[in-house]
Image: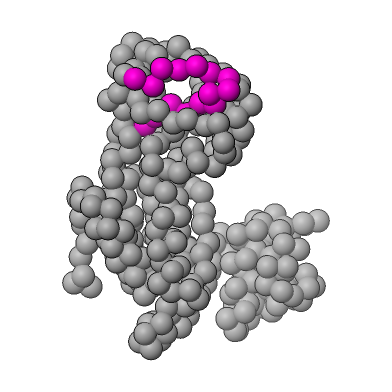
Amino acid sequence: MDIKQLRFLVALEETGHFGQAAARCHVTQPTLSMRLRNLEEELGLELVRRGQRFEGFTEEGRRILAWARGLLAAQDGLYAEAAACRGQLVGTLRLGVVPLAGFDPMRLLRLFAAAHPELRFRLFALSSEQILERLASNQLDLGLSYLERLDREHFDSLALADTRMGLLYDHRHFSIDPANLSWEAVAAQPLGLLSSGMHFRQSIDHALRSRGLNPQPRLETDAVHQLLQAVRAGLCCAVLPLHSGLDRLAEGLTLSPIDAAQTLAPLGLILRRAAPRSALAEACFNAARTLLAEDSIEPIDQHIDHSD
């Protein structure tokens, strides 16, 4: 067994396709398949369900995957820790971000990249539940998510801000008075919203229903870029977080604050407490605190424990 076989196995899980996994690992598909069969023979287990194409993992395969991810994270962490001991930070930071986060993650990554130019980043758009699951299984280094019902025993967190909400519209298509923009005024507009079940959508629904409002959205989607496309096309307006940077992505867009509008829980940076905890993740926490201090924004709530 060697570490490449484990990387092949994890790549297959992440892509769900033999050819894509091989391309990610820079090998041919026959080579990847052969090395995975060698791993199965060595372990005496069937790990992968095969048909005409990849059909998933066996129950035993999923148990082995958990160990493989841990070993790969330990290897990456070892190299990152060695670099940190030399005064360097290298490697790839894996960050999970909820859709429509009320804190622009690029502000943090730009600061981090400026201080450590050799770093690379992988971003994943995930639900808050998926972020916690992947942090717990060491598939992510950090999560940018809501802190509601966070298990403080297993996760550290740095609260970034309450997420205030505004109405995004294209002034070429809509004439809206931004002064004293109420939820009643918002409900009167054709709305584009994230799909039901997402935390940000739940906060919008709660605000509307608590005021006896029940507008029928013109468009629902789980993709933020489609929401922005619909706004630019004049199909609808959208409720988005303030300070997310999304209103600056195209000309003609205006994001006006809604009175008494914020999400049900603050947004924060989340780090798993259990080892291995990478030097990259720890450094990103420090970068976040620096960014907050420079912006003169006090963290709402800190739950950081350095006793481990």
Asked if residue 273 lies in the magenta stretch, the reply is no
Residue 141 picture quarter: bottom left
Q: Identify which residue is drawn at 53% across, 23% down.
A: 171
Task: Answer whether residue 171 is visible to the viewer in this image.
Answer: yes
Figure check: 301 above or below 116: above
Q: Give 98 or 72, whichever is nearer the viewer.
A: 98
Q: What residue is drawn where x is 45% and y is 17%? A: 176
Horizontal arrangement in the rendering, residue 38 relative to residue 151 (left or right): right
Please identify the residue farthest to the bottom as the structure is shown: 86
**Front one among 191 and 170:** 170
Q: Nearer the viewer, residue 184 or 267?
A: 184
Quarter of the rendering containing residue 135: bottom left
Q: Residue at x 52, y 69 (%)?
A: 120
Residue in the foreground of this view, choosing between 96 and 51? 96
Q: Residue at x 39, y 52 (%)?
A: 144
Please provide the residue range marked out in magenta: 165-179
The image shows residue 188 at horizontal and vertical percentages of 45, 11
Q: Position of residue 153 (x, y in %)?
A: 23, 58
The x and y percentages for residue 291 are 31, 58
Q: Is residue 138 visible?
A: no
Q: Position of residue 45 (x, y in %)?
A: 61, 71
Total count of labels: 0
Quarter of the figure that contains the C terminus: bottom left
| Color encoding of the figure | one colour
Taken as a whole, is the magenta stretch helix, strand or loop? loop
Q: Is residue 33 left or right of residue 288?
A: right
Q: Is 170 inside the magenta-drawn segment?
A: yes
Residue 196 lies left or right of residue 302; in this view the side is: right
> Where, quadrant-wise, is the N terminus in this rendering?
bottom right
